[in-house]
Image (spheres, rainbow, N blue to C red):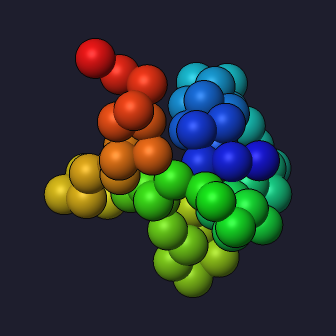
Amino acid sequence: ESNIGLNAISQWAFNKEPLLPQGLGTGMLYSNNIDSPYFIDNGFLKYNSDVAWNSSLFKDFIS
């Protein structure tokens, strides 16, 4: 999944309060992925609210 998709899936999974690990990665599979605040720490997907999303990829599409 891309980091945008990962954001949506991880929020959805969190709200379901799963009892088992969900196997979510960080989207590192994509060479053109958007930098995001997600990172892996000791096998857990975490979100750093001090890091902003890099939206420069969209600057030509957003007016």
**Position of residue 50 measured from the top left corner of the image (x, y, whole percent):** 19, 57
User: Does residue 3 lie above or below 5 as drawn?
Assistant: below
Residue in the foreground of this view, choosing between 21 and 35: 35
* Quadrant containing the C terminus in the rendered view: top left
Residue found 49% across the figure and 68% down from its top = 39
**Position of residue 59 measured from the top left corner of the image (x, y, whole percent):** 34, 36
Residue found 25% across the figure and 59% down from its top = 51
Residue 9 in sight in this render:
yes
Q: Quadrant of residue 31?
A: bottom right
Residue in the foreground of this view, choosing between 59 and 51: 59
Residue 46 in sight in this render:
no
User: Does residue 7 lie above or below 46 as drawn?
Assistant: above
Residue found 69% across the figure and 48% down from its top = 2
- Horizontal side of 62 relative to 26 (left or right) equals left
- Horizontal side of 51 relative to 32 (left or right) equals left
- Horizontal side of 22 relative to 27 (left or right) equals right
Residue found 51% across the figure and 77% down from its top = 41
Q: Quadrant of residue 25?
A: bottom right
Judged from this view, the residue extending furthest toward the top is: 63
User: Does residue 14 lie above or below 37 as drawn?
Assistant: above
